[in-house]
Structure formats: structure tokens, C-alpha cells
Amino acid sequence: RKEVEQDPGPFNVPEGATVAFNCTYSNSASQSFFWYRQDCRKEPKLLMSVYSSGNEDGRFTAQLNRASQYISLLIRDSKLSDSATYLCVVNKPGTYKYIFGTGTRLKVLA
Amino acid sequence: GAVVSQHPSWVICKSGTSVKIECRSLDFQATTMFWYRQFPKQSLMLMATSNEGSKATYEQGVEKDKFLINHASLTLSTLTVTSAHPEDSSFYICSAYSLRREDAEQFFGPGTRLTVL
């Protein structure tokens, strides 16, 4: 089993749609969780950290379910500019190292 | 967020040559820098962890004699790909992290695209 698993997509959605991504992680001892966005041929950029209580930043909502070991990202009112690959990131327990998922590709269509 | 730079942004070299990539944290002191590699359509894979003033630690399967890492100061880490071969062609990304920060966030450089002919 991969340490961090994501559906690679692509998810093709129309502008204005709501889309959700899930990510599962294998080690229950992980403590830090993030969603990163990566545009083609660019470095990943932090979208948001994910907290146990769930958190929201504008159109983006992240949730963490420790019992089931999954993280979700919800994007509301999708924009063309949201087209990118979304990377789920989990820390390696006991370290500050990141483990990246393979990413979920999103295409928002006009 | 903090700013991390990488140089060069891209490089093309002949097989057998060595290539040095620099990673700098511009506005904070990075106690730790990480080096990642990303092949097309794959995710970032951690290669090594670089701590200022000490030897780098390498992930399983990464050859330390091929990928030389030096972290001479709190703002600079270098990765040297020695005797590069076409299979080393990849996108190399560094990130910087500080234990002095409250969050666990790593700040990523813009990456270096290496093509070995």
C-alpha cells in the first residue's frame, strides 16, 4: 500500500462546479497534513494546511478524518484558474519530512 | 510566506559531466533543507535531508556518492549531480524549513530542470 494515495484523475468539471478530492494515508501516527497545488512544470505551492477541526479558506475547504485516515479537499465555484494538480502531503511520523501523493489533476472547463 | 530561490532554473549537460544546483532561503535561516526529484507525471520524491553543518541523510535507494549535498550555511544548500546520465534528467526541487518557525511548513524553491544528453 502506498503511503499516500490519491485518485490521479483527471477530473474535468465545468466552471462553477463543486469538486471534491480525497486522499488516504497509511500511517496513523502522521501529524501534519497539507494540500499543495502544482501547476505544470512549476514547484508546488501550499494551498492550505489541514487541521483536525476542518478549515476553510474562501472557496476551499479541507477536512481530516483521523479514524479513517483520509483527507479531503472541496473546491466550490470552480474557476478556470483552479486547473492544476492537487497534491496531498502528509508528514513522515516523528519527522518534518513530507510524503507526497501522486496528485489529482483538475481541469476546469469553460 | 518565505522565499526560496534555486539556481539554475534549467540546465542541459552532456552525459558524464557534473551539475551543481544551488538552493537559497532568502529571508529566513533554514535549519533544514530538503531535496526532491520529480519525474514526468510522477509526484515529488524526497531524495535527502540537508542540515546545516552536518552530513546529509539520504532516502533509501538514493546514492550519496552520486548526489552530493553540501549545506554550508543557514541560507544555502547545494546539490551536485556527479557524472550525470540521461536517466538523471528530472525536475529537482529544494525546500527550506526552520525549526524556529511555529508551523511545519516547508517553503519550496522554483525547481531546476535538468536534461542530460
Image (cartoon, helix red, strand yellow):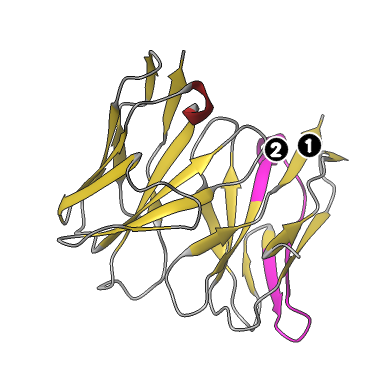
The picture quadrant where one finds residue B8 is: top left
Counting residues from the start of the chain, the first of labels 2 and 1 encountered is: 2
Q: Count of labels shown?
A: 2
Q: Which residues are magenta?
A: A61-86
Residue at left offset 39%, top offset 72%: B103
Label 1: element kind: strand
Give the residue type at disc 2. Ser
Q: Which mark is residue A83?
A: 2
Label 2: element kind: loop
- Disc 1 marks which residue? A108
Residue at left offset 39%, top offset 26%: B84
Please tell me whether residue B17 belongs to the stretch shown in magenta: no
Q: Which mark is residue A48?
A: none
Residue at left offset 46%, top offset 80%: A94
Q: Are marks 2 and 1 in contact (CB under 8 Å)?
A: yes
Which of these two is toward me, B94 or B50?
B50
Relative to residue B41, is residue A48 drawn left or right?
Answer: left
Horizontal and vertical percent position of residue A99: 56, 61
Horizontal and vertical percent position of residue A39: 59, 36
Image quarter in which the N terminus of chain B is found: bottom left
Residue at left offset 85%, top offset 47%: A17
Give the residue type at disc 1. Val
Please tell me whether residue A68 belongs to the stretch shown in magenta: yes
Relative to residue B7, is residue A26 drawn left or right?
Answer: right
